[in-house]
Amino acid sequence: MLRKSLIAAAAMTLGAASLSACGSSDSGGDSGSGGSGGDETITMGFAQVGAESGWRTANTTSIQDTAEAEGIDLKFSDAQQKQENQIKAIRSYIQQKVDVIAFSPVVETGWDTVLQEAKRANIPVILTDRSVDSEDDSLYATFLGSDFVEEGEKAGQWLVDNASDMDVDGDGSVKVVQLEGTTGSAPAIDREEGFNSVIGSDDAIEVIASQTGDFTRDGGKKVMETFLSSEDGIDVVYAHNDDMGLGAIEAIKAEGLTPGEDIKIITVDAVKDGMTALANGEINFIVECNPLLGPQLMDLAKQVVAGEEVEKRVVTEETTFTQEQAKEALPDRQY
Ligand code: GZL
Ligand code: ZN
C-alpha cells in the first residue's frame, strides 16, 4: 500500500541525490513521510495492553489524540492484559495490510512467531512502552519507552537516602513489602531489578515479602491485605505503579493505620491520583513513568513508513517527585 510507493519514491530521491546527505527530510522535495507528499494517509494498527491503570488510560489517550491530530488512520485494540488477544490483533492488522504496527507487549516473551509474520508481510513494527526479550532485533524497527531499571534504581536510591526515617517501628531494620507489576512484564522485572541493585548497599533494608498485584488497584489492595495479616513490622511498601499503591492505601487504612506515616509508600508512574495522594502525605515518593508517548510514536511511524533510518532505542524523559514537589506540580499535570 502506501509504504511500498513511499520507499520506492525515497529510493529514487536518494538515487537522484546520489552522494548528498541521504534520508534527511530537509533534502527538499517530498520527504516521503506519509501525508505530507502523497495524498494517502498512513494506516497504523495499535495493539494496546488493556485499561488496567491510570497510566494505561493516559497512554491510550495520548496515542489516539496524536493520531487524530497527525491525520494517521489508527486501528486500535484493547487486549484486556491477555497476550493471545494482542497476537490476534497483530495478525488482523497484517491481514488488513496496514502500513505500520505498534504495540506495548504485555509480557516480554512469546512474540517471535507473530513478529516474523509481520516481517514476512513487510510491515514494520514499533514497540512502545514495554519491550520483548527476542534475540532477533530485526523483528522491530525501534523501541520507544522508559528505562524501567532506572526507575527501580531511583526508587531504591530514595529509600537508601532516607533509610534513617524509614525504620518506622524502630526494630533496627527497614522491612519492605513489594507489590509487583504483571508477572513477566518488562516493567515488573526491571523495576524489581533496579530497586534491588540499589538497596543491596544497605544491610538494614530488606524485602520481606513480594507478590504481583497485576498493576491494578484491586490487586494492590488484596495483596496488601495479605501482607498486613502475614508479615510483622512492615515499614515500607514499594509498589511498581501508583494504582497498586492506592489499593495498598485502602488496605492500610482499613487496618486503622496511617499510610505515609505508619507505613511509608514508594510508587512509580506519577498519574494524577498518585500525585494527589503524594501531595496529601499518603505516599512518600513517586518515580515518574511518562505515558505521553503519542507524539514520539507518530513521528517514528512516519519515518519508518518513509523508509528512513530510526534509532533502535528511544528512551522517554521522566523525573521523580517528593511530597513538596507534587504540591507544586499537580495543577499542571496533564494526566
Ligand atoms: C509502564 C507501563 C506500566 C505502568 C502501569 O511503562 O507499562 O503498565 O507503570 C501500567 O501503570 O499498567
Ligand atoms: Zn523496622
Image: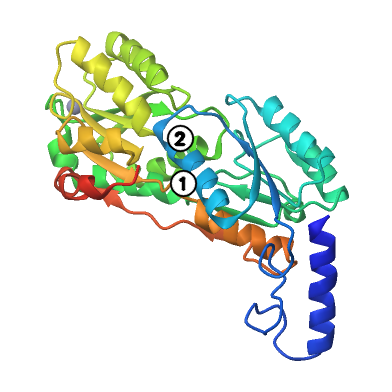
- Tell me which numbered mark, 1 or 2, is placed earlier along the sequence: 2
Horizontal side of residue 182 vs 119, given as left or right: left
Which of the image's four quarters has the C terminus? top left
Q: Decide which of 132, 332 is in the foreground and name it.
A: 332
Query: What amino acid does circle 2 point to?
Result: Thr
- The CB of the residue at mark 2 lies under 8 Å from ligand 1: no
Query: Ligand 2 lies in which image quarter?
Result: top left
Residue 307's spot in the image, x, y percent? 75, 67
Query: Alpha-carbon neighbours of circle 2 within 10 Å: few (<14), some, or many (≥20)?
Result: some
Q: Is residue 17 left or right of residue 53?
A: right
Residue in view at x 76 percent, y 56 percent: 138
Secondary structure type for disc 2? helix
Quadrant hosting residue 245: top left
Q: Is residue 177 visible?
A: no
- Look at the picture and state if 257 lies above or below 287: above
Closer-to-camera residue (301/237): 301
Structural distance between the alpha carbons of marks 1 and 2: 19 Å
Q: Position of residue 332 (x, y in %)?
A: 25, 50
Using the image, tell me which numbered label, if any, was put on residue 148. Answer: 1
Q: What element does badge 1 sit on? A: helix
Give the residue pinned by disc 2: 57
Query: Foreground mark, 1 or 2?
Result: 2
**Residue 85 drawn above or below residue 30:** above
**Residue at the right extreme?**
120
Q: On the picture, is 245 further left or further right than 64? A: left
Q: From what the image shows, is residue 212 above or below residue 24? A: above
- Which residue is situated farthest in the front direction here? 39
Answer with the quarter of the image where residue 105 lies: top right
Q: How many numbered circles does the render carry?
A: 2
Q: Is the residue at mark 1 in contact range of ligand 1, meaning its CB lies under 8 Å from it?
A: yes
Quarter in which the N terminus is drawn? bottom right
